[in-house]
């Protein structure tokens, strides 16, 4: 009787050990996996290289080429004769290329004042999700624009006068899988400004955010604040833009509404005459397509 | 009588504890997955798979971080983590199971076995059964397996637009070199 009892206890014990052994093995693996130190960088702070007009901290991967088509129709308040702006269009074609995973370069040509632009962007800091060691991502942007439109009345406009430079510190944080925000102090230098009352060095603060509404869609907002008393001879308003990102594989479509028609920093920040309240709203889109010129090993 | 019982109980405890210590372990196992369609070939490989095998009980377990999968194209890797595996929400994939078949893992040799267990991926646990090969050689066990999984079984949704670019079933290759732990 007694021995039977003992056998029973033993078999119970053994059985328990058997089934628990599996879980124990897995648990020991999970523990050592959790103990291994590793830094994971946050990815996908923004889906595209542009929030609407402002560049994001994102860059093409090393060896990847991004083709960007940015398009803005005419102003919504231009009336039915112009089909509410659809008869007119401004276009920017751009190429962005990742030299390394941190350094990227881009060129573009926009029809607004027939402007060429080029930039270098460097990912200085990358947000990491490991115990919040690095709370935000910071990229440094240096860009240049050169407009080529002829003005027969302004024969003095030589190539030096047509150049302008932008330096931006793009600071972004992905707060959650849905919400990211970017804040961008901006300094623009114009080699030539219309009057002596205008500043050659212009300071601005740009901010943007995205909120994902599904796994592949997000709503974006961008506001570019120009500090007052810098651009005085021409009417100027701050640029406010809304965007709707739709991502499909290697493409990102962005439908945008903005009171800026131009798309380079030296233009949309300081040369936005219209306001939303007067209906100076430009509808348009950005389309980006990613091509891999190099395959990572 | 009681003393003898206690002794044997202790012995069994000791023995089982000892057996658990003699496991085979690796932190550099390999798992790759491959999707082939006429439109696009996708592959991703992870060389940081943790795996453990208990030669006495024939139990085994695997654990990996989904962010450890390296794709030839970085954008694909980002999409995999962001849109499909959702590796911020479900960072790990695990497998726990046992192998059966004729084998004596204390002796050198090549054994064809069947592995049965549960795979946890994307927050979903599904039973998996596959044939595998275990090769015991010089304090090492080389394990290889090949099976297929269906993403939809793990609640990984694939939008219509890209459905044609991702195979219905994904080939999974497993290769581990287990070392006897000290």
Image: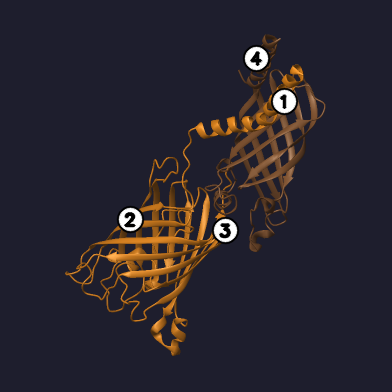
Chain colours: A orange, B brown
- Vertical order, A156 against B6 (above or below): below
Residue B122 lies, in percent from the top left, at 61, 48
- Image quadrant containing the C terminus of chain A: top right
For label 4, the residue is B10
User: Which mark's residue is nearer the viewer, 1 or 4?
Assistant: 4
Q: Chain of mark 4?
A: B
Q: Chain of mark 2?
A: A
The answer to whether dots 3 and 1 both sit on one chain is no
| Mark number displayed over residue A196 | none
Q: Secondary structure at mark 4?
A: helix
User: Which mark's residue is nearer the viewer, 4 or 3?
Assistant: 4
Task: Kindly indicate whether the residue at mark 3 contacts the one at mark 4 (C-beta within 8 angstroms).
Answer: no
- Vertical order, B57 against A77 (above or below): above
Q: Residues within 10 Å of mark 4 (few under 14, many from 20)?
A: few
| Mark number displayed over residue A250 | 3
Q: Residues within 10 Å of mark 3 (few under 14, many from 20)?
A: some
The answer to whether dots 1 and 2 both sit on one chain is no
| Mark number displayed over residue A168 | 2
Seen as rendered, the residue at the extreme front is: A1
Q: Chain of mark 3?
A: A
How much space separates mark 4 and mark 2, taking CA atoms?
71 Å
Residue B67 lies, in percent from the top left, at 55, 43
How much space separates mark 1 and mark 4, taking CA atoms?
19 Å
- Vertical order, A2 against B156 (above or below): above
């Amino acid at each position: 009787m007694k021995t039977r009892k003992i056998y029973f206890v033993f078999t119970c014990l053994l059985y328990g050990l058997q089934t628990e052994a599996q879980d124990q093995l897995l648990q020991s693996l999970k523990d050592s996996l959790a103990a291994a130190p590793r830094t994971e960088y946050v990815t996908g702070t923004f889906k595209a290289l542009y929030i609407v007009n402002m560049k994001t901290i994102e860059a093409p991967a090393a060896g990847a080429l991004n083709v960007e088509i940015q398009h803005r129709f005419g102003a919504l308040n231009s009336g039915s004769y112009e089909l509410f702006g659809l008869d007119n269009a401004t276009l920017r074609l751009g190429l962005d290329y990742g030299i390394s995973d941190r350094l990227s370069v881009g060129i573009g040509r926009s029809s607004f004042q027939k402007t060429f632009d080029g930039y270098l962007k460097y990912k200085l800091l990358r947000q990491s999700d490991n115990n919040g060691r690095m709370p935000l991502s910071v990229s440094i942007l240096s860009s240049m624009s050169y407009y080529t439109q002829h003005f027969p009345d302004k024969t003095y406009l030589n190539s030096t006068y047509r150049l302008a430079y932008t330096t931006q510190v793009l600071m972004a944080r992905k707060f959650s899988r849905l919400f990211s925000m970017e804040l961008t102090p901006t300094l623009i230098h114009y080699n030539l400004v219309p009057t002596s009352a205008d500043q050659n060095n212009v300071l601005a603060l740009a901010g943007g955010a995205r909120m994902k509404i599904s796994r592949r869609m997000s709503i974006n907002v961008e506001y570019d604040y120009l500090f007052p008393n810098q651009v005085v001879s021409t009417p100027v308003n701050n640029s406010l833009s809304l965007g709707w990102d739709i991502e499909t594989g290697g493409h990102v479509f962005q439908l945008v509404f903005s009171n800026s028609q131009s798309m380079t920093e030296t233009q949309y920040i300081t040369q936005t005459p219209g306001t939303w309240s007067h209906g100076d709203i430009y509808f348009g889109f950005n389309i980006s397509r990613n091509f891999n010129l190099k395959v990572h090993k | 009588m009681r003393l003898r019982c206690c002794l044997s109980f202790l012995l069994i405890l000791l023995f089982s504890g000892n057996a658990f210590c003699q496991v085979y372990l690796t932190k550099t196992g390999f798992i790759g997955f491959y999707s082939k369609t006429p439109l696009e070939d996708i592959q991703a490989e992870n060389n940081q798979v943790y795996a453990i095998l208990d030669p006495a009980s024939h139990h085994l377990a695997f654990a990996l971080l989904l962010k450890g999968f390296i794709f030839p194209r970085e954008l694909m890797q980002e999409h995999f983590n962001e849109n499909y595996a959702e590796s911020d929400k479900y960072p790990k994939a695990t497998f726990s199971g046992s192998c059966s078949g004729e084998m004596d893992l204390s002796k050198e040799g090549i054994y064809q076995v069947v592995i049965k267990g549960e795979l946890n991926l994307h927050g979903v646990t599904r039973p998996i059964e596959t044939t595998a090969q275990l090769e015991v050689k010089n304090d090492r066990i080389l394990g290889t397996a090949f099976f297929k999984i269906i993403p939809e079984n793990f609640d990984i949704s694939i939008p219509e637009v890209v459905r044609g670019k991702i195979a219905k079933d994904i080939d999974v290759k497993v290769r581990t070199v287990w070392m006897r732990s000290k």
